[in-house]
Amino acid sequence: GAVVSQHPSRVICKSGTSVKIECRSLDFQATTMFWYRQFPKQSLMLMATSNEGSKATYEQGVEKDKFLINHASLTLSTLTVTSAHPEDSSFYICSARLSGANVLTFGAGSRLTVL
Amino acid sequence: QQQVKQSPQSLIVQKGGISIINCAYENTAFDYFPWYQQFPGKGPALLIAIRPDVSEKKEGRFTISFNKSAKQFSLHIMDSQPGDSATYFCAAGGGADGLTFGKGTHLIIQP
């Protein structure tokens, strides 16, 4: 079945630093990947839609200069949290859509803690 | 404006009982309705999904009932087991857009 790998699973960083999270589709090509953010005991909130070879589409209220998304290949999308602050601490989850299908496969998530 | 409303927020069911979680959506363009199961610290895992051309889909102990006219769909877990204890999210989507999630239901199955 379709597998999405997300790395790192946990990261702790100091305030002001940047953190990169990778999302890889392991056994399928994904023209579209989605990045979600989840606060404790809350639902997943779509942050942005990442399309291979083009600029990401951000949801309203999400700072595109703070959350940089790059989808350089059909199997890799990255989310970079720039100048991270404690309020950016959250669970970030990516999902990938198999090209031509409507099914989304989710990664295991990345827990970011900003000190 | 929330597009997918999920209830209840939390649910306690005795082992062997039926767990029922409900969702309602607003956007008639949605054509894909999945349910996800999430354990603490893990990403959501697809449990079962339905499209609006059918009113019910069953996979093992899990059944989705779909009412297109009412714009509602529900998840039924038959013979609920302690291992089913998790947070369940309904979602809705269509076309090239990402999914819109409900707020989740924290399910506890008591042994």
Image: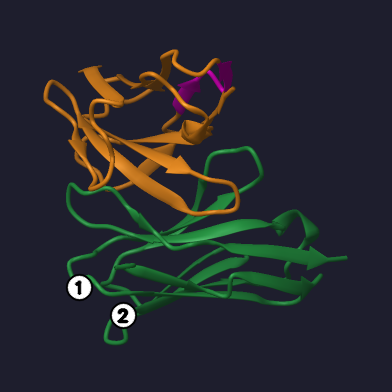
Chain colours: A orange, B green
Q: Is residue A73 visible?
A: no
Does residue B88 sit above or below B96 in this rendering?
Answer: below
Q: Nearer the viewer, residue B65 or A9?
A: A9
Ranked by sequence position, the earlier of labels 1 and 2 is 1
Q: Few, some or many C-alpha atoms within 10 Å of disc 1 (few <14, some 14-19, many ≥20)?
A: few
Residue A19 disc label:
none
Q: Identify the subunit bearing mark 2.
A: B
- Name the residue rendered at 48%, 62% in the picture: B103
Residue B71 disc label:
2
Q: What range is drawn magenta here? A: A4-13
Q: Secondary structure at mark 1?
A: loop
Query: In the figure, residue A74 lies in which quadrant?
Result: top left
Q: Is residue B89 visible?
A: yes
Quadrant for the C terminus of chain B in the image: bottom right
Q: Position of residue B10 (x, y in %)?
A: 65, 69
Please state which amino acid type lies under the numbered disc 1. Answer: Thr
Residue B98 falls within the magenta-colored stretch: no
Does residue A88 sit above or below B73 in this rendering?
Answer: above
Residue B28 disc label:
1
Q: Few, some or many C-alpha atoms within 10 Å of disc 2 (few <14, some 14-19, many ≥20)?
A: some
